[in-house]
Amino acid sequence: MDSAAALSVVIPILQGDASWMKLLPDLSAFPDSTEFLFVSNGPPPADWETLLQTSPLRQQCRWQQTAIGRAVQMNEGAVLAQQHFILFLHADSRLPAHSVSRLFESLQTDPAALHYFNLRFEEQSFFLMHVNRWGVWLRSHLLGMPFGDQGLCLEKDAFHSLGGFDESAAYGEDHLLVWKARQAGLRLKCTGADIATSARKYRERGWLKVTLQHLWLTACQATPQFYLLMKARIRVWFHGKAQSPSL
């Protein structure tokens, strides 16, 4: 399969947030066949048409208005997506051209996996953000828990078979999707390339407060999901034993 010709990019946008405009230049690194779905709880900005007229992506972009909520918006984008793969990309992300290339290489190598990027923060000069970057690497690679700000990409059919993002979750709908993928037997595969995100909330609310809050919320959500994962693996193991011929 030529995965370079089969990607939809879903970008959820909160009404009033203009961070997605900085992402627009990065999207030019994607192949011409890529579809971009901007899904927001508000209408397109007044200069939307002007932005498209000056962009080489104008034939590939669509703005869709839906209800508020990132899970709702990403699910709506997935329903509208026409391509084989879906990349869920946060509006405040930055994705260099070489990372786009590595994504397509990763899709070619293992199309059935759930793919993600390594995370770095735009304000990387702040030493404590290096600590967070290392923490994200350990969480993703050793614990198998990449988050949505790392750009989750998988086959559209696989996404729908997982039931999409949990719209009832108070937080961590991306985290829950990863757990569902693991429980269903999907492999996790890192592209080996970086995606950048803003460290604004750490500056505004304090590094220690935000970091501890994230650790606590992640642990609360991961504990029952880990139990379900072990339960699913034990069930598969027993099923395999039952199917084995007796000696």
Image (cartoon, rainbow, N blue to C red):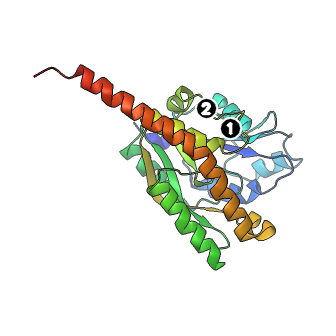
Vertical placement of 47 versus 118: above or below? above
Residue 39, given in percent of the width and then of the height, sits at 74, 39
Where residue 120 sits, quadrant-wise, is: bottom right
Q: Pointer 2: residues within 10 angstroms few (<14), some, or many (20+)?
A: many
Q: Determine the residue positioned at 58% across, 54% down.
A: 150
Which quadrant of the figure contains the N terminus? top left
Residue 195, given in percent of the width and then of the height, sits at 58, 60
* Residue pointed to by mark 1: 74
Vertical placement of 184 versus 197: above or below? above
* Residue pointed to by mark 2: 164
Residue 140, given in percent of the width and then of the height, sits at 50, 55
Q: What SS does tag 2 mark? A: loop
Q: Pointer 1: residues within 10 angstroms few (<14), some, or many (20+)?
A: many
Instruction: Tell me the amino acid under the disc marked 2.
Output: Gly
CB-based contact (under 8 Å), mark 1 and mark 2: yes
Q: Is 151 on the left-hand or right-hand side of 217?
A: left
Q: Determine the residue positioned at 32% across, 31% down.
A: 237
Cα separation, mark 1 vs mark 2, equals 9 Å
